[in-house]
Structure formats: structure tokens, C-alpha cells
Amino acid sequence: MTLDDRVAKFVRQLAAAVEAVGTESGSPADVDLEAPDATPELAELADAFNQMLDRIRAQRTEIEERDVAFRSALNRLGDALTVTHDRSGIISAVLETSALSVGATCGVFYAVAPAGGALRAMSCYRCELEGNQLDAGEGVAGAAVARDDVVHVPGGAELSPSEPIADAAVAIPLRRGNHAIGVLALYGRGPAEQFSDDDVHLLQSLMHQAETAIENTFLYEEATRLSITDGLTGLWNRRLFDLRINEELQRAVRFQEPFGLLLVDLDHFKSVNDQFGHQAGDAVLVELARRLTDATREVDVVTRFGGEEFALILPKTPVQGTMRLAGKVREVVAKEPFAAGDASIAVTVSVGAAAYPDHGLSGPDLLAAADGALYRAKGNGRNRVEEAEPGGRQVPRGAGASR
């Protein structure tokens, strides 16, 4: 084969490789030719072309891996957006999807403290900054919250030493109503690359989805809270009582621990409403709720059981401790009149006390035992505490005196 033939073959193979590179699915092999004699220029061309192919393959592999990761992140984001109560999951999925969508090196979602505006790293992508703090207005993240707008680095703010080191960054506030509750900050984009307007538009679209989903988590929490909270006193309601007494029973059985139960009922509450009015009656109920909360431990569960009746669950409390707290509750109510507008109302309560396992081994049994003790307290003159009968024997409702 003549030199001209070898040169022609080299050119044809080089052209074929160039055409393969130009196709969407092309994956050409290296141009591995013996350069024709006396043609060092062609050998250099082949070597340069092979190096270019290596870079193209590396970039293509990186793009394919990023595409797989991005698709996976989108799936997780879709799953997170359908679970209305998982706020942290939504934030983590939005952060990861945002970083992958614009090729950011790392990202942080900062939560904004309601008082003072300080920022705390709540979720991180490819960096270890959870719990890290920024002062109000500090760094690109703080600037975005302070200005309530998108902020870039460089050009819009300077990075804080507490933020990731990067040549480029962008921060976008996340709002609830008219104020920012968090900020998405992305850092690093590659050598001499900045975040473009198109990047920002994409990120803002993702943040809009996040705002809607996160607002739903607040609505879900509020609905849940209202379903287990008494609207007048702010105490837990009967629904929560039923849940907690079952939990306490399971714990008591598992660890062989006692717990106490008190039923507290206002004496002659109807006469309070008749004499002073229902607004005064409501004020008495609110004040009683406060005194009961103040008289108990943080671990105790204070609930409005219904009407003027309150129920208290006392974890890890035997009979003796239950009776002591019952006496304390009676005393803190009776020692000082209740203020209701201009009126000063003397109030007393009757208390029925029961404890697991002494007075019952189930929720209904304990409740019946405490209820029977409460009605004995009513029948024996009110403003007093009675302990449940051994084994949970009870006085049927109606056998005691009226309230």
C-alpha cells in the first residue's frame, strides 16, 4: 500500500470517527492508526483526536450519571410532595432536585428563626453543615432572606465563612404568606461558571412547588392539633386522652410500672353559670386549666374530659403519689378565688383517683374506678378527694349527689 493509500485510509477512518461522535448515540473507538511514514503531523492529529474523544466520553458519562440521579431525585420529590405532613422530606427532596437540575456542587436549606431572623442549616446536599448557624443577613443565604429576593455570588453578596467555599452561589427565599421561612442556597458550578437566569427560573419553579407543599404541611399540622385540642382551654381533649391512656397502659405492662389517673370535676358549676353568666363560667374553666397545668409535671397529661370535667394521666406514679397530687390539685383550686371580669368566684373541685394496677388493668376499668371515686367525693360533701375502691369497684353514676 502506497503512502497515499495509507493517508487516504487514515483520513477515511478519521472522518468516520468524527461522524460517529456527531451522532446522539455514537460511541466511537479510539482512532488507532499507524501514522503513515514521514507524516508526524497526522500522528499528532490522531493523538489529539483521541484525547478529545476521552474528554467527550468522560463528559457523556458524567451527563448520563447526572441524568440518572436527577430522574431518581424527581421521583423522590414526587413522592415527597404527595405526603403532606413530611416537611423535612419535602425540603430534602427539593434541595437535591434543585442542585442536580442546575449542576450545583452542593446545597443547603436554611430555616429562618421566627424571632431575630437567624438561619439554621436544616438540610444539606453534598456537604456536612446540618445545624450550622448564620446570623440574620449573613452570607448569600442571609442576604436573600433580608432582601426577600434572589441573591447571587458574585455580584449580589459575599459568602460567609460559615457557608461552603465556592466561586458562584445563588440563594432563593422560601415564603409562607408574606415572610420568608427558609432559603435554598446552592454553591459551586464549575470553573468560571455562574448561575444563569434560566437556572434561577427553574429553581423558582421548584421553590413554588415546595411552598405549596410546605403550606399544606402547616395546614395538616393545624388540623391535627385542632382535632386533639380543646378550643376553650387549650388543653388536650378526650380524643387525645383515649390515645394517651392506651399508650400509657402499653408502657406500664411492658416495663411493669404504675401510673395514676385523676378525674377532676368542678363543684356546683351550673350555679356559676346561672349567677355570673356563661362568659364567667368559661373564664373559670380557663383558669382551672391553668392551675391544673401548673400543679402537674411536664410529663403528666392534662385533658379537658368534657364539660366541667378534667382528666389527668400521671406516668410512673403509684397510688400514694396519685393521692398526693390529687390533694394538691384540690388545694390549689380552693385556696384562692377565681377572677372572672369584675367577679371573684370561690371555686372547689371533687377529685376521683385511681392507679394501675391497683384499681384496674385496662383503660375502661381505670376510668370506671376513678369515676366511681369522683361520685363518692361528690356524695360525701364535695371539695374532697376519694381513692377508687380496691379492684376497681365503682359507684354507678346517679348514686352520688348531683354536681
Image (spheres, rainbow, N blue to C red):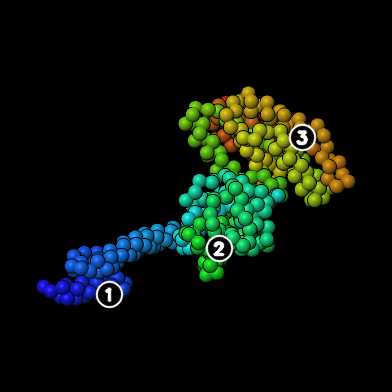
Q: Dot 3 corresponds to which residue?
A: 333
Dot 1 alpha-carbon crowd within 10 angstroms: few under 14, some 14 to 19, many 20 or more: few
Q: Nearer the viewer, residue 44 or 159?
A: 44
Q: Is residue 381 left or right of residue 9?
A: right
In the rendering, which numbered label is found on residue 207?
2
Q: Residue at x 81, y 31 (%)?
A: 335
| Residue type, mark 3 in image | Val
Q: Position of residue 17 (x, y in %)?
A: 25, 71
| Residue type, mark 1 in image | Glu
Whole-number angstrom distance, CA of label 3 to CA of label 1? 91 Å
Q: Position of residue 164 (x, y in %)?
A: 54, 50
| Quadrant in the rendering for residue 3 | bottom left
Query: Pointer 1 and pointer 2: residues touching (CB < 8 Å)?
Result: no
Res. 9 visible in picture: no
Whole-number angstrom distance, CA of label 1 to CA of label 2? 42 Å
N-term mark: 3 or 1: 1
Whole-number angstrom distance, CA of label 3 to CA of label 2? 52 Å
